[in-house]
Image (cartoon, helix red, strand yellow):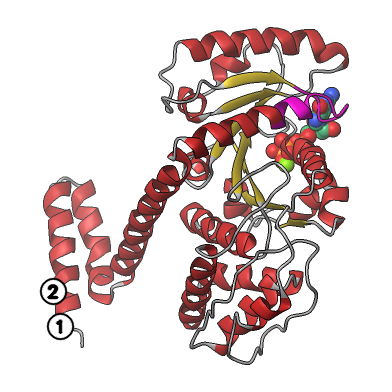
């Protein structure tokens, strides 16, 4: 558990008056930031930052909404807030019950209905019992398309979402998957600044969302359920290769025996795969979220993973590589957005696409024309 921050240290955090949010409650556990001043030019960003490090859930929610915002006039405040968050992370100290020296970011993926939300409910409560503060974020490709079902997850995580030491953030809606995932990446940092030391990121194992989640967490966990025996065949090899831990859920009642068989199948399938991590062999564990069985073993395995990664300095190397990946994702996304919205490019794009479809021009020359036009248009702008 993160220890109580001294009020003296907190008062030094933001020198600007808070407007959007003010410091309300000291959290049961929060970051020790030391006597360092963190300032920002934007009163809105300062206010939110001050509020969130003081334990205000309202400010935390508003801070995440700010970094999720696609409004152009929110961008400056969002980046001010994020730079305050980053500066605070370099002076935050962690003393957790499980001897972690940093936060722990846990990714969780699995097909619809395998029991991700049920597992998070039990696992989150288990971690809180051990003195942790738990934030749950979601990257949901279906909500990126349809607007999402916020209510569903809140009801499945009924006790966790109401707990003082948990923060459950429903999936953001109406965004591209890339945008949703990028925001989630930044939401992780904000939750950590607010004193949440365990961050659970859930995603449905379809599309490319699991790759994005694997690129923002310390450990990537795959949840599977025993079925007709052909679940392994239907599973994409890619997601198995990304997994640091496989959990066979629903190992209870009539599913107990099929679950053990599934465990064996996954163990032998993993033997034939190249491990992504030279220091770690993924384990396959049995558990039941419904009967609260196997949660201890899951946590022991995750703790061993954390220790292995931390002791070998791989934890922060992995985070450093991830930061680079996200920088490039953001550059790519931003450039593409600007290109598609450039007035001159936009005007000629339809015709060029038609010409490519009709074979009058090759895709390569069309792409070159678009890029030339875009670059020329950028150069004439003030
Ligand atoms: N028998 C059994 N059923 C479970 C267990 N965990 C979850 N379930 C059931 O499986 C169904 C789906 O559970 P959820 O937790 O909603 O699964 P999910 O993976 O979050 O589903 P999506 O969010 O739709 O992708 C529910 O009816 C749960 O009651 C378990 O350990 N054992
Ligand atoms: Mg769910």
The answer to which of 234 and 180 lies nearer the viewer is 180
Residues at discs 1 and 2 in contact (Cβ within 8 Å):
yes
Was residue 56 drawn as part of the magenta stretch in this picture?
no
In the rendered image, which quarter is residue 173 located in? bottom right
Disc 2: which residue? 376
**In this picture, residue 309 sits left or right of residue 4:** left
Q: Where is residue 229 in the image (x, y as percent from the top left)?
A: 66, 10
Does 147 sit above or below residue 249?
below
- CA distance for labels 1 and 2: 7 Å
In percent of the image, x 82 and y 54: which residue is there? Answer: 161
Looking at the image, can residue 14 be seen? yes
380 left or right, relative to 41: left
Front residue (pair 309, 206): 309
Q: Give the range drawn in magenta.
A: 287-299
Q: Does residue 153 lie above or below 230 as drawn?
A: below
User: Which quadrant of the rendered structure holds the C terminus?
Assistant: bottom left
Label 2: element kind: helix
Residue 175: x and y in percent read: 54, 60
Q: Point out which mark residue 380 bears.
A: 1
Direction from residue 356 to residue 255 in the image, left or right: right
Nearest the camera: 144 or 85?
Answer: 85
For numbered disc 1, what is the local secondary structure?
helix
Residue 188: x %, y % from top left:
58, 57
> Is residue 361 in sight in this rendering?
no
């Amino acid at each position: 558990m993160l220890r109580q921050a001294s009020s003296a240290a907190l008062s030094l955090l933001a020198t600007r008056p808070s407007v959007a949010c003010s410091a309300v409650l000291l959290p049961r556990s929060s970051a020790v930031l030391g006597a360092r001043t963190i300032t920002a030019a934007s009163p809105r960003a300062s206010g939110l930052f001050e509020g969130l490090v003081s334990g205000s859930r309202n400010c935390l929610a508003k801070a995440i909404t700010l970094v999720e915002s696609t409004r152009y006039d929110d961008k400056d405040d969002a980046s001010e807030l994020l730079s305050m968050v980053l500066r605070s992370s370099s002076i935050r100290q962690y003393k957790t019950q499980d001897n972690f020296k940093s936060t722990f970011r846990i990714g969780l993926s699995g097909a619809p209905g395998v029991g991700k939300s049920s597992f998070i409910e039990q696992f989150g409560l288990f971690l809180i019992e051990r003195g942790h503060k738990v934030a749950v974020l979601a990257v949901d490709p279906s909500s990126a398309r349809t607007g999402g079902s916020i209510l569903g997850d809140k009801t499945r995580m009924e006790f966790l979402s109401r707990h003082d030491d948990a923060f459950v953030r429903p999936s953001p809606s109406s965004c591209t998957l890339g945008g949703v995932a990028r925001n989630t990446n930044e939401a992780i940092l904000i939750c950590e600044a607010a004193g949440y030391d365990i961050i659970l990121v859930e995603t449905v194992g379809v599309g490319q969302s699991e790759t994005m989640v694997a690129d923002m967490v310390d450990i990537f966990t795959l949840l599977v359920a025993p079925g007709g025996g052909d679940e392994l065949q239907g599973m994409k090899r890619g997601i198995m290769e990304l997994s640091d831990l496989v959990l066979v859920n629903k190992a209870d009642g009539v599913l107990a025996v099929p679950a053990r068989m599934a465990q064996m199948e996954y163990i032998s399938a993993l033997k034939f795969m190249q491990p992504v991590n030279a220091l770690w062999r993924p384990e396959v564990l049995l558990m039941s979220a419904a009967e609260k069985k196997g949660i201890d073993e899951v946590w022991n395995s995750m703790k061993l993973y954390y220790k292995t990664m931390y002791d070998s300095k791989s934890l922060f190397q992995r985070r450093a590589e991830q930061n680079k990946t996200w920088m490039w994702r953001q550059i790519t996304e931003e450039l593409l957005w600007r290109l598609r919205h450039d007035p001159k490019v936009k005007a000629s794009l339809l015709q060029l696409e038609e010409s490519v479809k009709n074979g009058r021009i090759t895709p390569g020359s069309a792409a070159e024309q678009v890029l030339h036009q875009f670059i020329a248009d950028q150069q004439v702008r003030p």
